[in-house]
Image (cartoon, grey):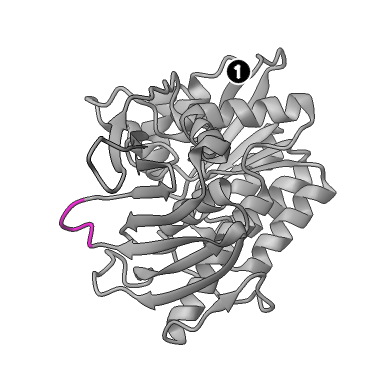
Amino acid sequence: MIEPVTRLFRCGIVGLGRIGAGFDDNPHKSTISTHAGAYSTNRSVKLVSFCDIDKNRLLKYGKKYQVTKLYTNFKEMFENERLNCVSICTHTTSHLKIVEEAAKWNIEGIFLEKPISETLHHAAKIIKICEKKKIKLQVDHQRRFEPFYQNIKKIIGNQDFGRIQHVDAYYGAGVTNTGSHLFDLIRYFFGNIKWVEGIYGSNPSNNLSDPNVDGKVCCQGEVICSLHSLDVGNYGILELDILSTKKRIRLNLAKSSAEYFKVAKKKGLVYGELTPYKHVIQNKKNAIVLGVENLISSIGKNIDPLCTGYDGYHALEAIVAIIKSANKKGQRTYLPLKKNNYKVFSR
């Protein structure tokens, strides 16, 4: 449990698109899925300013969240508002220049949307700037903030889980857009990624600049994860199927739910079989709400956030590596990469 922080943090948001504010427009949805919604529920936060190039968005969300300091220029916002924290929810191509500007104005915390940047070179610059200015940099790979996934990580690490035999991942909507979540979670569960092999998928992405890639990911301990990309125009899917020598966990990453199985050997059978069992983990808060809480807490306690800039860098590195492998028709690509100027594209 994150302890409350007594300070009141002045916070702002740059970019009021889907993750910035738009996902919470649905009146029938009770969960909070945006930075604006998460800040507005945090008692340690005063949401003071918004910035977006779309004036209609500014007026719409300014009214919704009772934010009166509205800007179309982020430089003016940082200069005028003296913020403690900012969320950067813009396209990846703008991340570095916004971080550079924020660092000039004594920002203490940055909540940066994934992927961390469009190149590893820019990602490294972002990390260096934040370290130099002692800014807590948190990348929005949200599943790290949820007790559900933290508990799954513990289960996998227990001896009674057995040796991991194989992992299968199913995703769509682009290896950069959706794949960034997958690569971060794979690394979170199984350790640093050693190598990847990729081929362009036969099922199309919904973004021509961000293709689907199938392939293999090898982590520490020789854990192999197979990536399977699907066309989300048919149905949405984001799943991880973990098979060990003793158990199986089939994860629905979109719903943060799981099916659990363990080996049972019935009398008369030659082989053991997987039988379901119940294991309940309750998430009391939405991931992005927990993310804001974690960022504020990390500033107050002077500790690293749950998803650091380095975590964001390594997720981006895996994306670049598997695209490079696909460009070479599946040639194995080892990490860390020696060149860091390849540019990825994401929505």
Q: Position of residue 129 (x, y in %)?
A: 77, 54
Q: Where is residue 20 in the image (x, y as percent from the top left)?
A: 45, 40
15 or 143: nearer the eye? 143
Task: Please determine whether, in this image, residue 237 is positioned above or below residue 209.
Answer: above
- The quarter of the picture where residue 26 lies is top left
339 or 98: nearer the eye? 339
Toward the front, the furthest residue is 268
Task: Please determine whether, in this image, residue 279 is positioned above or below residue 306.
Answer: above
**Which residue is rendered at x = 57% and y = 39% of the image?**
157
**Which residue is rendered at x = 24% and y = 43% of the image?**
269
Instruction: Look at the image and say whether residue 282 sits in the magenta stretch.
Output: no
**Which residue is rendered at x = 69% and y = 78% of the image?**
338
Label 1: which residue? 1
The magenta segment is 231-235
Query: Badge 1 local density, few (<14 within 10 Å), some, or many (20+)?
Result: few
Task: Please determine whether, in this image, residue 241 is positioned above or below residue 122.
Answer: above
In the image, taking residue 285 as reference, residue 230 lies left or right, namely: left
**Can residue 194 be seen from the camera position used here?**
yes
- Quadrant position of the N terminus in the picture: top right
At numbered mark 1, what does the secondary structure look like: helix, strand or loop? Answer: loop
Toward the left, the furthest residue is 234
**Which residue is rendered at x = 37% and y = 35% of the image?**
256
- The quarter of the picture where residue 111 lies is top right
Which amino acid, by three-letter code, is at mark 1? Answer: Met
114 or 109: nearer the eye? 114
**Can residue 252 be seen from the camera position used here?**
no
Majority secondary structure of magenta residues: loop
In the image, taking residue 99 as reference, residue 317 lies left or right, namely: left
- The quarter of the picture where residue 126 lies is bottom right
